[in-house]
Image (cartoon, rainbow, N blue to C red):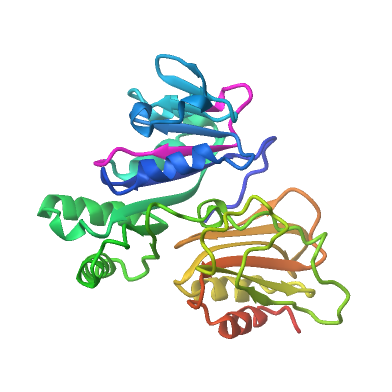
Amino acid sequence: MTAATPTATTPTPVTVLAGFLGAGKTTLLKRILEDPRGVRYGVLVNDFGAINIDAELVVETGADQVSLANGCVCCTIRDDLVEAIGRLLDQDPAPEHLLIETSGVSRPIAVMDAVLDPALGGRAAVDGVFCLVDAAGFRDLDFASTELAIEQAGSADVVVLNKTDIATAEDLAAVETTLRGPMPNIRFLPTRFSEVPREVLFGTGHVAPERPAVQGNGHGHDHHGHEHHHDDHDHHAHDHGEEFQAWSWRSAAPLDRAAFRNAVRRLPATLLRMKGVLAFADKPGERAVFQMVGKRHTLEAAAGPAPTESQLVAIARTGSLDTAALTALLDGCGGGG
């Protein structure tokens, strides 16, 4: 984990969608593009014809680029992925978030390397890598394909087990056994029809300690589990019902950095996303930002004033979190209750 280098602009976040043909990558991508929720996405795909974007959304079509009425733009990957990413970042207006759908035989690690290529000058950063797996068809893969699937899943932050509505218990057990064997820390997200909540894909929203929901209550922390998403974000999807829960934690006292790092190593594998703005005792004026997606996490200094209190928000499948244990784990980070 490297410290953030102060730059004039924040790197554009990149989400990578990996997995075999037919696993549901294109369905997920289409869902995002047809309902971008105010975000201007730049998309890189091998064949945007396969996405079959609603014709009413398309405002301009070029040789290797499609512009959509909602501000999103799709480009094909010709030869050089680094060059393609650079072209997208050079758009005016520039995309706010990049999505890269890999080909079925691609290895996500190569895509991640391209995003971090020095030629891009730090203008892009990997936000999350999601590998979609056809849970119903996994057992039918031949040996070589299974090996590639293991490699793809191993490079991912979260493995989306898609088509669980038609997969049998034996199918699901086979996927879990095959992938968890070599990768015990793997994060699984069962789903159907590529319905992945935006909070899982792109984060739990903005954490703003300057505007806490509860303040002045005499306690160092305020933590609560939500069975529904906050309704102050009217763009949230409601079709997930109570499948996911949000959880939050606060500390009025500065945290001990070593204790927090130790707590991070002990976070449960059922956590899908966590984000926070933190204040540490060893650097009183620093604004520290923590982000976690699946098994990836970063803790970096950010521009701006130190928060008046530390806050963390997280999302997980409902019922998968021991919230009392998670609260106790973080309460032990020197934040004093």
Where 107 falls versus 63 (above or below)? Answer: below
- Residue farthest toward the right in the current orientation of the protein: 216
The magenta stretch spans residue 81: no
* Residue 103 rendering spot, x and y as whole percentages: 29, 37
| Stretch in magenta | 88-105
Query: Residue 88, image x and y in percent?
Result: 51, 26
182 w.r.t. 5: above or below:
below
Q: Determine the residue positioned at 44% across, 25% down.
A: 75
Instruction: Give residue 259's quadrant in the image.
Output: bottom right
User: Can you tell which quarter of the image residue 226 is in?
Assistant: bottom right
Q: Position of residue 34 (x, y in %)?
A: 51, 37
The residue at the point 74 percent across, 48 percent down is 303
Instruction: From the viewer's perspective, tell me whether residue 316 is left or right of residue 104.
Output: right
Q: Dominant secondary structure of the magenta stretch? A: loop
Q: What is the count of numbered marks? A: 0
Name the side, left or right, on which 316 lies relative to 16.
Answer: right
Position of residue 271 measured from the top left corner of the image (x, y, whole percent)? 50, 69
Q: Nearer the viewer, residue 294 or 48?
A: 48
Q: Is residue 93 a member of the stretch shown in magenta?
A: yes
- Residue 151, above or below 62: below
Q: Residue at x 28, y 69 (%)?
A: 180
Q: Quadrant of the C terminus?
A: bottom right
Camera-side residue: 8 or 187? 187
Q: Is residue 11 above or below residue 315?
A: above
